[in-house]
Structure formats: C-alpha cells, structure tokens
Amino acid sequence: MKKIVILTFFALSILACKETSKEEAQAVLSESNGKINNVSIIIDDNLWNGEIGDSIRKKFAAPVDGLPQEEPLFTLNQYPTKVFEGFVRKSRNVIIFKKGNEAGYASTTNKYAKPQNVFFISGVDTEDILNILESKYSEIIKTIKASEIIENQVRMKKSLVSDAQVQKMFGVSLKIGFGYKYDMVRDKFIWLRKEFASGYNSVLIYEVPIETVEKDNNIIANITQMRDEIGKANIHGTLPNTWMITEAAYAPYLFEEKIANKKTYLTKGTWELKNDFMAGPFVNYAIKDTKNNRYLILEGFTYNPSKSKRDLVFELEAIIQSVTFLK
C-alpha cells in the first residue's frame, strides 16, 4: 500500500510539473502584434504568385458585404518561409502554406505569441493544398473574425465610456470604446457618436415590439421600414427636410446570428440622407428578447467619405457584440 501511495504521488508530481511547465511557457510568450483584420500569409513566392496565391486572395481578401466601395475581408501580408521570424512570428493571425511529403491541416493558438491564431496547410502538390484550402477556409475566416472581435473589445476596455444610461434605459450592458459620447438620449432611444477628422462612427440603441420585425415573412422589408421610421424621427442632416434612410438602390444583406445566445437578424447595407448626398455603411442587429417582448435594436453606422470603412464598421460590431442582458 505504501508503495502504491508513493507511485501515485510521483505520477501526480510529474503531471503537476508538466502543467506548471505549460503554464510557464504560456506566461513567457510575448504579446502578439498587428493591426485589426491583418493576416500574415507564410508562403514561398513561387506558390504565392501562382494558383495557390490566387485562391488565397480570392478567399481571404474577398470584398466585405455591405460596404459602398470594395474593401478586402482581411489585409494580407505575404512573407516567404525563410523570413518567418521576429515580428512576423509574433503576428496575431498566421496562415502557413507548405509543400512537403504529405497533405495535412492543423490549427493552434498562442504558439509563438499571445493572443495568436496559427493555421498550417500542407500538401504534396498544388492540388492537395487547394483542396484543403477549399475545405477549411470558412472555418479559418470564422475563427479569425471571432478572435478579432475579442481583440477589439480588449483594446476598448483600456478606456471605456460609461454605459450607465444604456443599462438604466434598456437593461443591457455594452463595452463602449473611448471617444464615444451621448449625442442624443430620448425615451427608449440613445445615439452614441465618436467624431474623428474625416467623419464619425455612431451607435443607435432602441427597441421595438416583436411584431414590428415579425409581422410577416418579409423580414428585410420590415427592418428597412423600421430603420427608415427611426431615421426620420431622430437622425437628421444639417439641411432642412433631410433624414437617414436605407439606400433604396441596393437591397441590404440579411443574416441570422446568435448574439448573447439570442436569435438575431443582422442586416448590412448602405444608409443615405434623403434630400442630401451623405451616405455610408450600416450594420443593424435586431436581437429577439422574448422575456421582455421586444426586439432590442443595436445599430452602427459610419460616415467616412472617400476613406476606408472596413475597420470602422468592425469596431461598431465589436461594441454591439459585447452586449450583455441584465434582466
């Protein structure tokens, strides 16, 4: 019995040492680097300049839905395998492509820095790599987008704006990043805005009865009508008789999501000012809150004429997806 106890203690000690070593290894990892929505592609030039590179660009630099001008899903930075060291190794999102003796796919986190996503795709030939890329790219995109939302939220946490008025009026909490101010607070309506040199970002918070969104099967038309009514009542331009509407020339995109574990309709499209020339992209999250018999509407819209809008919209999505229901 004494021998069994000693052996058990020895085994547990080894296990504890292994766990400690793992934790220590994680602790000494340096902080990853990179702008939001940037991805490092580690691939030799001959592959990057051929069919594989074309497929990578088509999938990971595809145009973002809902933006008025074409902007890529991710900004891709290509590096040959031999220079995969230093700051490149510490990139937050890394995809490594390699020809070798066998085909395979793997993914891991925090391998060279933290936080970090690293994906490995290898093949004996071009066909192998293209087949794996085709089967795995959606999963890779989903993983990167989710982690970039978290990274954006982490950066916002460093200097948050109080959400006390949001909590009091709607019973939810939001992580509101630095620079946003309460531009308008009315009965069951809040408009937060952050101004910068070339334009501004806005977050709208309001609620509508469930039947407003679900009165028939035409969800996109119902949400568009709802947006236009809210815009006419609250979002006006500097010129007389101008207000925000959903751009009529292009139908918005509609997706079904889960936000705060609740059914959500995500609408992406372009807004414009009626009787004026201002316009830009919007994202509208209609979150079904059955407990309170409502759809909570969290919308973000951007005005940044002639400049990039992708990361501005992504910041709005990071704020909106931080929502927590308090009651």
Image: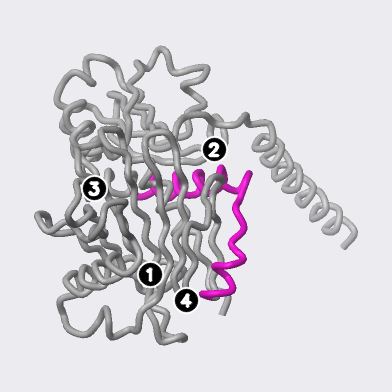
Q: Nearer the viewer, residue 136 or 202?
A: 202
Q: Is residue 179 above or below residue 30?
A: below
CA separation in Å, label 3 and label 1: 21 Å
Which mark identifies residue 297?
Answer: 1
Q: Secondary structure at mark 2?
A: loop
Q: Residues within 10 Å of mark 2 (few under 14, many from 20)?
A: some
Q: Which residue is at a point 40% across and 12% down the rendered structure image?
A: 82
Mark 3 vs mark 1, foreground winner is: 3
Q: Residues within 10 Å of mark 1 (few under 14, many from 20)?
A: many
Residue type for callout 3: Ala
Give the mark nearer the N terminus: 3 vs 1: 3
Which mark identifies residue 214?
Answer: none
Which mark identifies residue 279?
Answer: 3
Q: Which residue is at a point 42% across and 41% down the rendered structure image?
A: 107
The quadrant of the picture occupied by the C terminus is bottom right
Residue type for callout 4: Asp
Residue 155 x %, y %: 56, 42
CA separation in Å, label 1 and label 4: 14 Å
Query: Which residue position is annotated with label 4?
Result: 187
Where are the magenta residues, as a range?
A: 142-170
Q: Are marks 3 and 2 in contact (CB under 8 Å)?
A: no
Q: Main secondary structure of the magenta part?
A: helix
